[in-house]
Structure formats: structure tokens, C-alpha cells
Amino acid sequence: MGQTPKSDHDFAALSACWDNPTAVLVLEDGTVFPGIGFGASTTNVGEVCFNTSMTGYQEIMTDPSYAGQLITFTFPHIGNVGTNGHDVETKTPAALGMIVRQPVTNPASWRADQGLDAWLVVHNLPGISGIDTRALTRHIRDNGAPRGVLCHQPDGHIDTESLVQMAKDWPGLNGMDLAIEVSQKTTDKWSDGSWDYSKVAHRQTSAKHKVVAVDYGCKQNILRCLTDAGCDVTVVPANTSATDIMAMKPDGVFLSNGPGDPAATSSYAAAEIATLIDANMPIFGICIGHQLMARALGAKTYKMERGHRGANHPVKDLATGKIEITSQNHGFVVDPDSLPDDVEISHISLFDHSVEGLRHKSKPAFCVQYHPESSPGPHDSRYLFERFTALMNQGRS
């Protein structure tokens, strides 16, 4: 007699509970996905998106760029390495909830400090398992990222009609400035390089360049990569003026990633970035930093149907012809038809040919839409941090 796979037992248990769910995901069009709740017993409303990464669920959940979003994980093994204090991208997660197919597993890693379920409870984040994530992903692919509500109610008393209305009433990410909400409020020094497991300590690199990083929702691994590249990093709030930045006498300015609509954030950020560019300050932007730099130069941005979220996105460097496999997380994109004559496209997506990088033709300023710091994802694009330091070296000479 053959042995029944463990996964069959898992799904049999889930099927038995679907008639009496302890959590639901409700979309604005009335679609209801019942399932089994985990994490915190709470209700959150936001945009429902999906991420195709095979690793790094903790890094994804703590990426500030996911503010306002409920994340569907298409990879099945969520929870298998638990959580720890080193793999976070910010102290307080900005994502609103976790959607998975299989029940969250217990950690099987020597690096785990606690299980994923307990970690979600600590951060008051709900989760739902038992969802047909393939069907949900196809729904998002075909119809765009919907507004939705994730409700975890252990006693099963769930009013789906009121949740549908809650989803419909949520305003959506268009026109929403979330960068100012997740940005730090004070100016602080950053000194940690990437983690060295052999020494059980952060790498130490001699600082050669003074960099001001504008925090629109910055991932910590970006700051680690800047430190590894020899940068002495000072992090400032999103609404810091160009005058205050220039008063710090930096060698370069970094524009971080972050959430929300870049058109909303640019209402206070674009003019300051334009001033820095006009002053010939070396500038490097990532994600919303890329979009804000584009808007500062006169370009437009718009919301994508479903966005790019995963660690397997091919991008072409138009200068070298090389292909990079990149980590991405964005729902807005730069309109290529709106670019001014003094800006050129440096990188494009091989999925949909959208703009993935820009370079100013006469100023020391460039930016990319994707995440060269990865975490999670491949390291194909780490050279961009060296490109930034090369610009600062040229500025000094």
C-alpha cells in the first residue's frame, strides 16, 4: 500500500474547515476566498498584490514599499525558515497581511528566532492559508490589482457583506502619499555593512564618500550596500529640503525606494530633487526614488495594471546589452513618452519593455526602477552601487 503524501493530509484538513472558515479574503468585486487564519486576529484593507519570489518572505513583509498592500505569495513553502532579527528591512513592517496556499510550517533553520505565526502576532498582522493562490494570481493578472480586505476571526463570525463594502470604500493607492508615513522622522547616521557570518558581525568598510540618503521608505539592505561600497551614510526624512541636504556637504545623494503614488510624493519632493540635480550633485535613485527623479526632470508616472513583484525579472542594460535578473516591487512606472530630451532610458524590462532605468545626459544623476540591493533576490545589479561611487569620484576630481 502506498503512503499518502503529507500535503494530502494538509489539504484534507483545510477542506474540512472551508465550510467554517476562520479567515476570509474579500475583493471589491464581491469575490470571497475563505480559508484558515493565522497570525494576528484583526482586519486590514488594502491593495491585493502577488509576489513570485521563492525566498525572502520576511524581507518582503518588512519592505516599506509594501505599505498599503496585502501580499499573496505564489511560492508554497512559507514559514519554513521562521523569522529572525537580521532579515528585516525595517523595524516595523508596513505590509498589511499575508496570503498563502499551504498552512504555515514550523521553522527548520538554525537562524530562526521564532516562528512566522508568532512573528505576525507580535506585529499585529493577519494571515490566511488555504487560498487557491493560482486562481487569485490569475484574477490579479487579468483584472489588475484589486482593493481587498483580509479578516482573521478565530471564532468564525465573519460578516462578508460588510467586508465587501469596506473594500469598495478604500480609496486605493492612486494619489496616496505613503512615503511620508513610513519615512523616519529624524536625521540619523547609518553605520552597518552587510552581515558577515564568519565573524558574526556587520562588515566594516573604510568610508570614502559622504552620502545623504533620503528616506521615502528605505530598505535597510540598501543602506548596508552603500556602506559596503565605502559610503558614510546619513539618513534624512522624506521631506528634507535641498538646502538642508546641501548644508551637510555630501559627496552624493541617494533617493530611496518607498510606497505609494510618486505623483503625490513629488508634490514636496520633486522641486528639492530638481535643485540637487541643477547643482550637479551626484544622485542615485531606486524604485520610487527613480520615479521621483523622473518627475523632478519633467516626466510623468502612471499606475500599472498589476505591477512587478518578484525576484526573477529580466532587465536589459541598453549600454552594454547585458541581461540582469532583478528583484522588483513596484506598482507605478515612468511614462517613456513624457521624458525630456536631456534624459535617456538606460534599462528596460524584457517582460513588458517598461522603463527600468534612466540617465541624465549632462548631469551626474541616474536611477533604476528595480532593486539592486536584492534582499531577497539575485545580486546581478550590485555594480550600480560602484557606479554611484564612481560618479562621486568624478565629482571630486
Image (cartoon, rainbow, N blue to C red):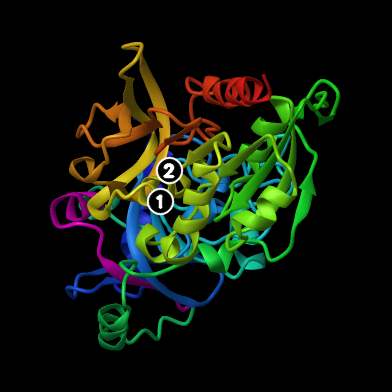
Q: Determine crowd level at label 2: few under 14, some 14-19, many 20+ residues with C-alpha closer than 10 A.
A: many
Mark 1–mark 2 distance (CA, rounded to whole Å): 10 Å
Q: Give the range drawn in magenta.
A: 137-153
Foreground: 286 or 2? Answer: 286
Foreground: 75 or 369? Answer: 369
Q: Is residue 287 left or right of residue 113?
A: left
Whether residue 138 appears in magenta in the rendering, the answer is yes
Query: Are the residues flagged by discs 1 and 2 in contact, CB closer than 8 Å?
Result: no
Q: In this view, does 322 lie to the left or right of 265?
A: left
Position of 88 relative to 208 (above/below): below
Which of discs 1 and 2 lies nearer the camera? The answer is: 1
Name which residue lies at 22% across and 31% down.
351
Query: Residue 148: x, y in percent?
Result: 31, 70
Q: In which quarter of the image is the N terminus?
A: top left
Residue with the mark numbered 1: 296
The type of residue carrying mark 1 is Ala
Question: Can residue 114 be seen by looking at this rendering?
Answer: no
Position of 299 relative to 345 (above/below): below
The type of residue carrying mark 2 is His
Mark 2 lies on a secondary structure that is helix
Q: Determine crowd level at label 1: few under 14, some 14-19, many 20+ residues with C-alpha closer than 10 A.
A: many
Query: Residue 278: x, y in percent?
Result: 50, 43
Q: Earlier in the sequence, mark 1 or mark 2?
A: 2
Foreground: 185 or 249? Answer: 249
Residue 344 sits in which quadrant? top left
Label disc, if present, on residue 290 of the rendered structure: 2
Query: Residue 127: x, y in percent?
Result: 47, 63
Query: Residue 117: x, y in percent?
Result: 59, 58
Mark 1 lies on a secondary structure that is helix
Name which residue lies at 55% across and 32% down.
373
Name which residue lies at 39% across and 58% down.
262
